Amino acid sequence: MTVDRRLAGRLAERGAGSDLEISTLLKEAGLDAVVDVLVDEILFRCDAPVNPVPVDIAMNVTHGSEQRRIVFRIARDRPIDVVDGDDTSIRREIGIGAVDLVRRLYGRTGQRRLGDFTDTFLPTRPADLAELPGILTSTNQASGTLFSGCTVPQDDLGKLSVAYGSDKWASFHWYTGHYEEQFARYRDQPVRLLEIGIGGFDGQLGGASLKMWKKYFHRGLIYGLDLFDKSALNQGRLTALTGDQSDPAALTAIAEEHGPFDIVIDDGSHENEHVRTSFDALFPYVRPGGLYVIEDMQTSYIPRCGGTAGPVAGPDTTVGLLKRLLDDIHHNEQEPRIAEAPTITQSQVVSVRVCRNIAFIEKGVNGENGIPGWMDDDAWVALGAIPPADS
Ligand SMILES: C[S@@+](CC[C@H](N)C(=O)[O-])C[C@H]1O[C@@H](n2cnc3c(N)ncnc32)[C@H](O)[C@@H]1O
């Protein structure tokens, strides 16, 4: 099923709005197109089925006088299918309003209502009652699976990283704890996230971290950028773009079309020069309050990646860039005071958090003037903060 990715983005944005706002979008887009997006999202979110006996569950989604019926076939070791079930195969009938389903999927955590669906359990008597115990257990399990897809996922990033096969946790790196600390405040927001480097080796398509972000940010629009065409990964709320992170014009074109971004993550080539080029091109397209993240800074110390041999990373390395940002944050404290207009990193970098091999650069207004430039030693003496020179 191909879904309207633009509509998926609009639903994610509108999901925390009022009933009227959601309903207006539903009318505008049409129930069929909306249900296609919602089913795609549910299938993405569902836990792996565990029921040994295949179970068909019907979901009747209504909006005003319109209704759309979807039958999910759920069985262990198989992807969940949307099928044309007949009434005797249905083990459970769920009825839900489209507005409530949109809110369940794209509302803020805790925003959904309790009691937002109707439920008929085993509407038809099984032909052979000896099968009833197995059917009952499998129906319970399949229902749990379906409802895992109809809620806001709460999994932590470490678990998601391992489940999708990213190396951001429990590999050479232990990044996801740092990500959780930094990203918690965005989790409920309709963030736009761009990650450079989609991954996938040995002919694999990759996309592990993009799927991880899509699940973590249940309202997020996730963009990936890679040298190689990975557009086969495209789905609701996830877009794979092709381009070279060392090409500033390509990065600007991408950011003009899809930005500004709340979060940019550089997990691409890790060549020091590429990291700096990408930062220069994309930091202007990070929203105020957003973050620019750089992974794998160990290449600052690897000469074949443009790093410096030895214990002090040079100015052209990623660590060198971060050291410069510390000076930029303090540009208003330096003597002599800079007369010309501050650079973008001087005026808009408000914090730099460096952890092992990963850095989080926060954008905002770095506009405090600090101690006035005229506060010379005499003024400090007058304040009694330092002793007079001849004392
Ligand atoms: C470490 S993998 C990304 C892994 C992925 N982010 C994850 O966590 O699952 C690095 C990716 O960067 C891509 N890459 C390498 N050089 C690049 C460049 N110059 N521009 C864009 N992508 C590049 C590679 O093709 C590869 O897919």
Image (spheres, rainbow, N blue to C red):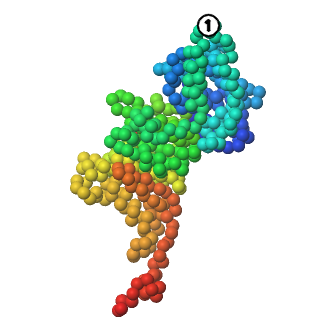
Which residue has dot 1 on it? 128
Location of residue 103 in the rendering, given as x and y in whole percent from the top left corner: 65, 38
Vertical position of residue 345 compared to residue 259: above or below: below
x%, y% of residue 170?
37, 40
Instruction: Single out the residue that lies furthest toward the right.
Output: 65
Outermost top residue: 128
Binning the other alpha carbons within 10 Å of mark 1 as few (below 14), some (14 to 19) or many (20 upward) gives few
Q: Quadrant of residue 7?
A: top right
* 334 or 126, nearer to the observer: 126
The residue that appears at 42% across and 56% down in the rendered structure is 353
Q: Is residue 232 above or below residue 222?
A: above
Q: Is residue 146 above or below residue 270?
A: above
Q: Which of the 4 image quarters holds residue 196? A: top left
Q: Nearer the viewer, residue 338 or 36?
A: 36
x, y percent for residue 354: 39, 55
Q: Quadrant of the N terminus?
A: top right
Q: At 54% from the left edge and 45% from the top edge, which residue is drawn? A: 187
Disc 1 on helix, strand or loop?
loop
